[in-house]
């Protein structure tokens, strides 16, 4: 499957938000996907104000304050950003 076949208008993001633990992306087809914030170190290290400044693009979400983004495809396939490290579990 090529990238063009994977990315369709129905899969375009229409909204995105972050809380302290997850990034949530609503898609044009009505689905909502989420991923742990630690998957994306640039978001995990950002302030709530920086996370709230978000722009929708055809195939993903862009945070201009950090000059970085996440593709819908990467979220659906479970691809973490390079350098992403799971938080230490409490013993």
Image (cartoon, rainbow, N blue to C red):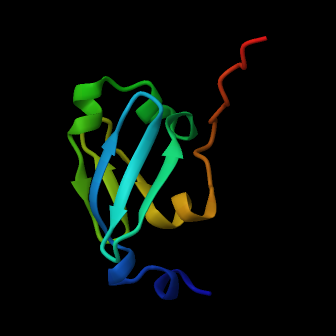
- At horizontal 37% and vertical 62% (from top left) the residue drawn is 60
> Vertical placement of 37 versus 79: above or below?
above
Extreme-right residue of the structure:
91
Whether residue 57 is visible to the viewer of this picture, yes or no, is yes
Whether residue 65 is visible to the viewer of this picture, yes or no, is no
The quadrant of the image that shows the C terminus is: top right
Left or right, 51 with respect to 86, comes to left
Left or right, 90 with respect to 69, comes to right
The one of 59 and 52 positioned closer to us in this rendering:
52
- At horizontal 24% and vertical 46% (from top left) the residue drawn is 54
Residue 28 locus on image (x, y percent):
30, 74
The one of 68 and 35 positioned closer to us in this rendering:
35
Residue 43 locus on image (x, y percent):
42, 34
Residue 24 locus on image (x, y percent):
39, 49
Picture quadrant where residue 58 is located = bottom left
> Vertical placement of 68 versus 10: above or below?
above
The quadrant of the image that shows the N terminus is: bottom right
Left or right, 85 with respect to 61, comes to right
Left or right, 40 with respect to 14, comes to right
> Vertical placement of 85 versus 54: above or below?
above
- At horizontal 32% and vertical 82% (from top left) the residue drawn is 9
Task: Give the number of marks.
Answer: 0
Residue 2 locus on image (x, y percent):
57, 85
- At horizontal 57% and vertical 40% (from top left) the residue drawn is 39
């Amino acid at each position: 499957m090529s990238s063009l076949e994977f990315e369709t208008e129905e899969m375009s993001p229409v909204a995105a938000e972050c809380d302290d633990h997850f990034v949530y992306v609503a898609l044009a087809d009505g689905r909502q996907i989420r991923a742990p914030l630690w998957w994306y170190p640039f978001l995990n290290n950002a302030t709530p104000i920086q996370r709230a400044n978000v722009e929708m693009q055809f195939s993903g979400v862009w945070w201009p304050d950090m000059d970085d983004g996440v593709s819908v495809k990467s979220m659906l396939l479970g691809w973490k950003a390079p350098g992403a490290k799971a938080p230490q579990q409490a013993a």
